Image: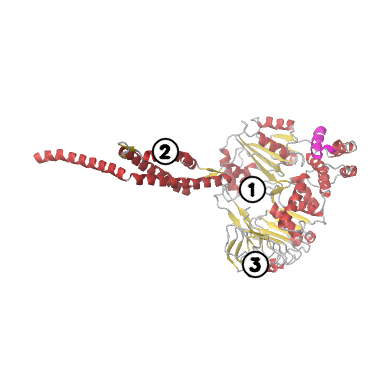
Amino acid sequence: MALEILAIVVTPINDIGKCLFGALKQQIRYLTSYNTNIQNLRRQVSELKLTRDGVQTRVEAAQRNLEEPFPNVQKWLEDTTEEKLDEQLRDFDEANINKKCFKGLCPDLSSRLRLSKQAVRMTKTFHTLQEKVNDFLVTGIAHPRPPPNIELVRRPTIVANILPRDSLMNDLMEVLGDSNIRSIGVHGMGGIGKTTLVEKINNELAGHILFNKVIMVTVSKDPDLGRIQKDIAQRLGLNLPDSSTEIRANRLFERLEAEEKLLIILDDVWKPLKVEDIGLPRGCKLIVTTRYHQEVCVQMDLQKIIKVEPLSKDESWVLFESKAGDVVTLPNLKPIAEKIVAKCKGSPLAISVLGSVLTSVKEEFVWSDALNVLSDPTRSGLEGIMPEVVTSLRFSFERLESPEIKKCFLFCCLFPEDYSINLRDLRDYGIGERFLKVVGTLDNASDKLLTFIKKLKDCCLLLEGDEENSVKMHDVVRDVAICIGGDAEYGFLVNVGGRLIKFRESEDLKEKKRISFMKHSKDVLRDPLECPQLQSLLIRENDDTRIDQENFFEDNKSLEVLDLRGMRKVSGPTRFIIPTTFIMPTPQSISCLTNLKTLHLVYCDVSDKISLLGGLRKLEILNLRYSIVKTLPEEIGNLVNLRSLDLNGAELSFVAWNVISKLSYLEEFYMKNGYYEWDTMTRGGEYNASLKEWSY
């Protein structure tokens, strides 16, 4: 019994003794490891600063790509600023860590113990902050910005900021505020200002209480439901499945149903649309702009219809004077100018184009010629376009100073409506067809193109594109350009988005010189292309449209420009969605095109045909971007006139020795995410071409 009592008493005393000894041992360890603990802290802070610099660099790169850092990343950056880290190290300055006691005879042990403990604790905290970066690498540093509720239209229109059309704006805003009206039709002739009006409304509604979200999409002549659905989904930040339009419509409907106070603007509608086919709920407010009152406004059963009337006499004069300048006030020209404006019948497009063409022109005979042309307006048969508009555009075209700039303008009509035309593509076509004559370098050709583009913009014949280094055509200007280009002199044929022409049934094809097939779906080109005069051919961005015959190009010896390209389809709005790609096969008969100067094979499979390109000795531009190439054989070295080679993103695994150095005229060499182990030098040790990175 006594032993048990003794055990009860002794055991706790023993445990307390162990705890006290352990605590004392830990305090001694803090003192003996004093310098080590402070060094570890400083090392940890240095590493944390370097890590923070790396994270900050990634965040800045993401922000340049219009992305936002995740909140936890932003908070981490705020917690690890250099000022905060340095502030926490102030206790560890030289004065504190070298503090003495007993008149400087021995170290201040109390201070050392406190600082050593603090250093260990802070080192653990900073280590935890350091480890959090590993989580960022898994979850990501940043995410795409959510789409804005209202995307402001910033690109200039032909009559931007010239015509407020206050009465129309007020009428439309009043109707938008009426809760009993769900659908509105805005109709008027082509070029009358419908798009300008709804773009102004779109911008006006930014920050307005009427709507939480406004989405504006262009429909165009040949509506593509899939593209319209995709445009709306992108504005919602919604990932649509790559499936049928019906399934996509259902998903879009569910998402739009969750939106309150929503306005959808469908611009440039040519045919009646069933909004349920797109996926629009009946609850959202809808504006439709169209040239056609009966066919669209009535058949779509739009509740309120607003007609955009021609400009008044005073509005017409103000617009014309703003475009033509002070020259209209000259006594001998003002009477002619007034008659010209009257002949335009209030069309903003006609007035803008003619005013721009006649800017600073003081010769009376030029003004008289314009009046004479307008006095007999062209009857083109173009639907929904005033004859005066067609005549003014033709006059502007004829006033262009050279055949080269005229051809440059007409080449822009080969693309779909509302399409942003890449200037580098246009430059390459111009080099091939020689409307951009390469007297010096490719940079000289680019400068010449930019000169043309500026003049065409000044004449209101081209507009800024939606993308960098791009242009686009007003839909009415494009219609007239296609009409002009169809003349035998130019021989343009534009077939976009409809049914592919059966070549053997169309005798007109034999006279065509420039042909464009774009935005078709699941067609097969089976018949050889019998166009002996053909100079340029664009077969690009068609969904699963294939050339079925290897001898397809056998009768096209005169071809100078060929653009074959598949397409890259992104089904979601973010860059994290893996896109699907249609790779176009390349027919064997491409080797027959010995007169080619420009060849674009983008998203094409040329792996078993690449050696055939070596026979195209006149080739100056070769674009193999994102294509399956596999090898760059010795035959490519035979392209002695090649000036530009683009291998950005090409699938390439082998390059024949010295093949690049044989291309002595090469000026541009584009490569990114591709093969890097070739020799770009000549035997003299100098580089042939400037090595560039180019991304679209």
Give me the C-alpha separation between circle 3 and circle 1: 52 Å
Which label's residue is closer to the chain start, 3 or 2? 2
Q: What secondary structure is marked by label 2? A: helix
Q: Do the residues labelled 1 and 2 touch (CB within 8 Å)?
A: no
- Apparent side of residue 114 relative to residue 337 in the rendered image (left or right): left
- Apparent side of residue 489 relative to residue 56 in the rendered image (left or right): right
Which residue does the numbered mark 2 point to in the structure image? 90
Query: Main SS type for the magenta part?
Result: helix
Circle 1 residues within 10 Å: few <14, some 14–19, many ≥20: some
Q: Is residue 317 magenta?
A: yes
Asked which quadrant contains residue 249, the reply is top right
Q: Is residue 526 magenta?
A: no
Which residue range is magenta in the image? 310-327
User: Which residue is nearer to you in this view: 553 or 203?
Assistant: 203
Percent coordinates x, y for residue 495 in the rendering = 73, 54
Q: Are marks 3 and 2 in contact (CB under 8 Å)?
A: no
Q: What secondary structure is marked by label 1? A: helix
Percent coordinates x, y for residue 289 in the rendering = 71, 39
The residue under label 3 is which amino acid type? Gly
The residue under label 2 is which amino acid type? Arg
User: Which residue is nearer to you in this view: 458 or 602?
Assistant: 458
Which residue does the numbered mark 1 point to in the structure image? 227
Asked which quadrant contains residue 516, the reply is bottom right
The N terminus, quarter of image: top left
Report the disc number at residue 546: none
Q: Which of marks 1 and 2 is in front?
A: 2
Asked which quadrant contains residue 654, the reply is bottom right
Report the disc number at residue 684: 3
- Apparent side of residue 429 relative to residue 149 in the rendered image (left or right): right
